[in-house]
Amino acid sequence: MITAQELRETYLSFFEAQGHKRISSASLIPENDPTVLFTTAGMHPLVPYLLGELHPQGRRLTSVQKCVRTGDIDEVGDDTHLTFFEMLGNWSLQDYFKQEAIEWSFLFLTRELGISIDRLAVSVFAGDENAPFDEEAYRLWLHQGISEKRIAKLGKKDNWWGPAGQTGPCGPDTEMFYWVSDEPAPEVFDPKDRRWVEIWNDVFMQYNKREDGTFEKLEKPNVDTGMGLERTLAVLNGKQSVFDTELFEPIFQKLHLHSDAIQRPRYGRIIVDHVRAAVMIIADGMIPSNKDQGYVLRRLLRRALRTYKQVAGDPAFFVSIAESAVETLRESYPALLQQKTTILEEINKEQERFSQSLEKGEREVLKRWERNKSISGVDAFNLYQTYGFPLELTEEIAREYGQEIDHDSFAAEFKKHQELSRVGSGQKFAGGLADTSEATVKLHTATHMLHQALRSILGSHVEQKGSNITPERLRFDFSHPEKMTQEQVQAVEALVNENIKKDLSVQFQLLTLAEAKARGAIGLFEDKYATLGDKIKVYFIGDEATGEYYSKEVCGGPHVERTGLLGRFKILKEEAVAGGVRRIKANLE
């Protein structure tokens, strides 16, 4: 048996021995990446460096990255899908390539984890009209001793990554599979056989897709890898499901004390998964709201609460499940202990709000019955969608009046809702390299200037709570207890423009954590950079000759070289996002 902490440490130590620098997990809330609401893979925090920026720790990196994926939220409850999970990864930033990546992958699996080669199979890119068969990866696996019968050649659907948009870096990948059955593994690898479970993926970013649809080879390719901690832990320990591992068992024990979820295992999995994800999202500074990440957080909590109610759990004990989730994760993420009070308070608040929504839903059910003398499947879905009112509760009320809900019409409406959600997820949650056009680089720099202006005008309590940048505008979320006055908005806008006109220098320095703090740089140090390593990147906006700086902020980049290139800064809107969090939308004219 191997524990989660042993697997994390074994992975990081192995790649440190191969010259990689260990970096900390970035926040679940991406910084300046409009393509995603949450960090969905280890590569997201490394976007600027995959595009050529110099990383403070060099060209070989390794980490355990916190991730949230919501595209398959309705699938949670099966053996493999999770909303929050951890991704083990190692990266080459224009350094080593396929030979080292594959050799180290094989060594880690067979030597460090002790997996027999008899239980391993791999897949490689088969080639198509745009890019050739990945013969190099194929031959490298043969060299490791993998039989040609255990190497599947698959198309772009299975063994290709990217680009994130219509153009950009992309390339073939190779995936590694583990045989989970007690029966001997077949001689020939069949990727459709579910007893072969994918546990690792090496992506080789070696091409650039042009606007005309053709592919050109990159002079300096990257390697991006990912191994799911929970899935790997499950298969190595002979568990049927990720929910059967040590990461979840204590939470289930607490849940089963106060409900009959043990009789309805899928319900129990939904509750535990969603609460665990909510705990981690709140710990990274987000609170339930009706917008963006806050809306997803609210949806997760309310779905967990709704499901908890269905297994007859005493509402008073719901928060104890969150407390147990904190305990299972605090060893790897010590900041959870500091955030524990806030996490539990926010979950309690959302539970109270949801209870009020349920009361409204009950009134609406009765109103519809009195008006129509029936409750249709469409009515039931609208109540579910608008108030989060459970179908089961609608059915209970309907049965009191001698009526059964039409499940087919409810299911049809639900399916339409899922399809629309998936379309939205495909747009909003698609992972990949963020846009790095000239316009977004300018707005990224302007965001630093806005952050400092808000602190100057409103006070040092202002901290960044989120950022989203497109070529057209920036959106900046920050902590502030009340609506800004018109005078404050105008003062912030004027201060940014004043420093744009000064044509200040924008440059970075590599500093230690202690040096950055001593220099007055702002950043989420304890959460994001505490274990980053020797140096971090701090951008200074000001007069380099005199050492007088307007803004000092930890950031990966990219930025313009001088503020005079930005044009005129204009605040378009200031609004509330959630309790104690405001949002500014602005652009450059």
Image: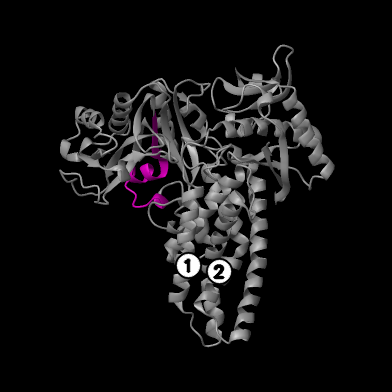
**Type of residue at label 2?**
Tyr
Distance, label 1 to label 2, CA atoms, is 10 Å
- Residue closest to the far right: 487
The x, y position of residue 92, in whole percent, is 40, 25
In terms of secondary structure, where does tag 1 sit? Answer: helix
Q: Which is nearer the eye, 172 or 343?
A: 172
Residue 458 magenta-drawn?
no
Using a 10 Å C-alpha cutoff, classify the residue at mark 1 as few (fewer than 14 neighbours), some (14 to 19) or many (20 or more).
some
On screen, 525 above or below 519?
below
**Type of residue at label 1?**
Phe
Using a 10 Å C-alpha cutoff, classify the residue at mark 2 as few (fewer than 14 neighbours), some (14 to 19) or many (20 or more).
some
Left or right relative to 258: residue 492: right
Q: Which mark is residue 414?
A: 1
**Quarter occupied by the C terminus:** top right
Say which residue appears at 26% left-offset and 31% top-offset.
137
Q: Which is nearer the eye, 332 or 250?
A: 332
Say which residue appears at 53% left-offset and 49% top-offset.
277
Disc 2 target residue: 384
Numbered disc total: 2
* Mark in front: 1 vs 2: 1
Q: What range is drawn magenta here?
A: 223-244
On screen, 544 above or below 409?
above
- Residue closest to the far top: 545
Q: Which is nearer the eye, 346 or 262?
A: 346
Left or right relative to 242: residue 360: right
On screen, 143 above or below 160?
above
The x, y position of residue 240, in whole percent, is 34, 52
The x, y position of residue 513, in whole percent, is 62, 22
Say which residue appears at 71% left-offset and 35% top-offset.
569
Disc 1 vs disc 2: Cβ atoms closer than 8 Å? Answer: yes
- Residue closest to the far front: 212
Residue 580 visible, this angle: no
